Image (tube, helix red, strand yellow):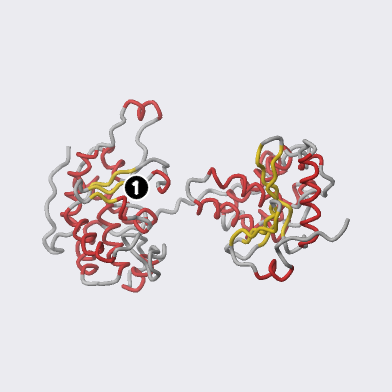
């Protein structure tokens, strides 16, 4: 086969920054934020646009990628499926995993979830079995990945085994493997020791201590302090607050609407805004940023570690930002005595089973507004004279 040409150069492949770089005729070099480089080919197969992983750029050269792409395109033009009909080697585990990751990216509501999915494999599987053909991976290779972290990082190991299983299942469906999935065999045979899962709760501040802490935050001018105050008052998740945009906030209706794409449950969530919340937001509008809580870079949000680092700088070591949601829940149970469904909806938790939710379609915004007003009154009260909170019915 003659020397094929395109837009990319060998030097360009080595120095390209994060993103997708076209070589021509559907061949792309994909560079992850981590610096990992891989080849992807986009071709039309039987009227449908398909993406195929051609391997990592560290061991598949530019010329080899072009040759493989040419063969795939030839098969596609003849009406065949390149995965089955092209003359090619069995993909490695890393190649297969990267392809599965690309294929599933549109299904994740949050891109970070997709990154976490492949990063687990990158950290714990690719170094050990990444270069092995997917057809050659059996129980010994799976144990090589799982055994070192099975007892110390049980949750990570559980996720790793699930993700390896998915990659091998997809490889089998594409004709690259046969037989039982070795991950399933290992679990069925109980080869690995049984580990009692440790339930780790986010460390929370006692609700009685919140007014004094909030008073201290009010004296600080840092954007992280403003964001943390808003997080405490709304009982929201870190990412929901940091990624809040002005277009989501209706000052007239006193309401913040978090779109479904940014919610853990995948459903739009309305947050009633109290006087204390609005007092934080109003001065920030003058910055005319895209985000309510702008970071060091213009029109970029604060770092997701900014609020936690603020806690540590203040000297609070045993509390997490997420823990303030638990603080709110404890206060509701012990002081406000609000109905469970109202409290859970404030935390954007799903209440009841599918049938119950189908009949109870209201998000109880008016009742939640009453409860959040009471919570704001507690949080902003004088530390030595915490307000008494009447029950919310």
Q: In the displayed structure, does residue 212 sit left or right of residue 160?
A: left
Front residue (pair 176, 292): 292
The residue beneath circle 1 is: 258
> Whole-percent x and y of residue 293?
32, 62
Say whether residue 125 is left or right of residue 273. Answer: right
Q: Is residue 360 above or below residue 66?
A: above
Residue 350 appears left or right of 385: right
317 to 271, vertically: above or below = below
State the image coordinates of residue 388 (x, y, percent, origin top left). 12, 51
Quadrant into which the C terminus falls: top left
Q: Nearer the viewer, residue 173 or 322?
A: 173
Write the residue at 72% across / 62% down: 57
Q: Quadrant of the N terminus?
A: bottom right
Q: Nearer the viewer, residue 143 or 55?
A: 55
Instruction: Give the residue drawn at x 73%, y 53%.
Output: 54
Label 1: state its secondary structure. Answer: strand
Q: Position of residue 267 (x, y in %)?
A: 39, 40
Q: Is residue 94 shown to the viewer in this render?
A: no
Please tell me in which quadrant of the rendered image residue 36 appears: bottom right
Check disc 1: other Cα within 10 Å, few if <14, some if 14-19, many if 20+. Answer: many
Q: How many marks?
A: 1
The percent coordinates of residue 199 (x first, y second) are 45, 50
Any part of residue 366 in sight: yes
**Residue 384 quadrant:** bottom left
Q: Residue at x 73, y 64 (%)?
A: 58
Q: Residue at x 69, y 66 (%)?
A: 13
């Amino acid at each position: 086969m003659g020397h094929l040409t395109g837009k990319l150069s060998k030097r360009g492949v080595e120095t390209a920054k994060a993103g997708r770089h076209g070589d021509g005729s559907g061949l792309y070099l994909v560079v992850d934020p981590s610096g990992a480089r891989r080849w992807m080919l986009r071709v039309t197969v039987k009227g449908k646009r398909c993406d195929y992983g051609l391997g990592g750029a560290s061991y598949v050269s530019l010329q080899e990628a072009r040759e493989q792409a040419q063969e795939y395109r030839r098969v596609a033009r003849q009406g065949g499926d390149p995965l089955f009909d092209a003359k090619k080697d069995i993909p490695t585990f890393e190649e297969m995993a990267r392809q599965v990751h690309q294929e599933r990216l549109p299904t994740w509501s949050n891109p970070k979830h997709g990154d976490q999915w492949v990063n687990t494999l990158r950290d714990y599987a690719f170094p050990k079995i990444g270069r092995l053909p997917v057809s050659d991976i059996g129980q010994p290779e799976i144990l090589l990945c799982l055994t070192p972290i099975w007892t110390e990082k049980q949750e990570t190991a559980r996720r790793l085994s699930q993700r390896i299983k998915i990659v091998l299942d997809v490889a089998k469906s594409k004709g690259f493997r046969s037989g039982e999935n070795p991950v399933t065999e290992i679990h069925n045979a109980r080869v690995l020791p049984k580990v009692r899962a440790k339930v780790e709760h986010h460390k929370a501040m006692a609700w009685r201590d919140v007014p004094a802490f909030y008073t201290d935050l009010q004296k600080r001018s840092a954007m992280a302090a403003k964001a943390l105050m808003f997080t405490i008052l709304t009982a929201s998740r870190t990412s929901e607050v940091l990624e809040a945009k002005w277009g989501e906030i209706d000052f007239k209706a006193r309401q913040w609407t978090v779109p479904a794409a940014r919610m853990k449950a995948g459903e739009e969530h309305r947050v009633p805004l109290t006087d204390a919340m609005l007092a934080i937001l109003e001065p920030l509008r003058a910055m005319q940023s895209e985000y309510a809580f702008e970071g060091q870079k213009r029109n970029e949000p604060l770092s997701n570690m900014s609020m936690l680092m603020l806690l540590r700088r203040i000297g609070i070591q045993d509390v997490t930002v997420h823990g303030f949601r638990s603080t709110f829940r404890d206060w509701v149970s012990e002081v406000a005595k609000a109905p469970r469904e109202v409290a859970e909806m404030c935390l954007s938790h799903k209440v009841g089973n599918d049938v119950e939710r189908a009949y109870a379609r209201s998000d109880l915004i008016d009742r939640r507004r009453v409860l959040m007003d009471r919570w704001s009154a507690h949080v902003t009260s004088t530390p030595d004279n915490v307000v008494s909170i009447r029950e919310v019915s």
